Image (cartoon, rainbow, N blue to C red):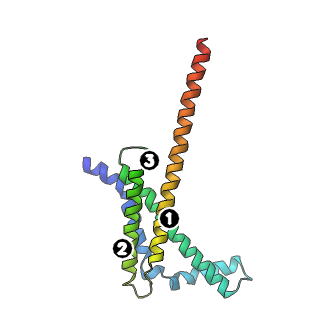
Amino acid sequence: MKIWHRLKNWLPAIAWACLISFLSTDVFSSDHTSLFIIPVLHRLVPHASAETLELMHAIIRKTAHVAEYFIFSVFLMRGLRGKNRGWTLRWAIWAIAIAGGYAALDEFHQSFVLSRTASPWDALLDTLGASIAQVFLWLWHLSRARKSSANIISSTESHAEHAE
């Protein structure tokens, strides 16, 4: 039963890692995603040149790297902290390291897919996404802690005023 509780915290990260691996296949190569993304972009921006549409497609793909590893990092934090709450630098570093390692493995995998190109820059973008997620989580937990302590202080002051 204890193993299930630990595994339950890791399931979102494991599922997301599987999705990342699927997205690294031929099905989601630039050649294939351009078949549906560029026509959509052309409808949205009909006067854009072919070069501009290709650039927009590339930006969307690179933004996807950051976004997918941002989410992965959040899920990794959930698994790392287990039943604990809050944010610690130790958990954040581990989440970034695991995400960065997975990004490197993902790029290595892509080197074997004929329609994909392995790039250390993509792994760096992925790790950047994971790092941004941890900064976001840190700021979110920091703001929640400040609100919580502000509520405690105002509650204490309110009690002191009523006691007078």
In the picture, residue 75 is in which quadrant? Answer: bottom left
Identify the mark at residue 129; answer none if there is no mark. Answer: 1
| Camera-side residue of 39 and 90 | 90
Q: Secondary structure at mark 1?
A: helix
Visible in this render: residue 1? no
Furthest-top residue in view? 164
Badge 3: few (under 14), some or many (20 or more) residues near its Cα, within 10 Å? some
Give the vertical position of 120 relative to 69 (above or below). below
| Camera-side residue of 114 and 118 | 118
Give the vertical position of 155 relative to 103 (above or below). above
Q: CA distance from mark 1 to mark 2?
A: 16 Å
Q: Disc 2 or 3, which lies upstream in sequence?
A: 3
Q: Amino acid at mark 2?
A: Leu
Q: Does residue 52 appear left or right of residue 2 in this picture?
A: right
Q: Secondary structure at mark 3?
A: loop
Visible in this render: residue 136? yes
| Camera-side residue of 138 and 111 | 138
Q: Disc 1 or 2, which lies upstream in sequence?
A: 2
The residue under label 3 is 87
| Camera-side residue of 147 and 40 | 147
The residue under label 2 is 105
Percent across and percent down for residue 149 are: 53, 33
Q: Amino acid at mark 3?
A: Trp
Q: Disc 1 or 3, which lies upstream in sequence?
A: 3
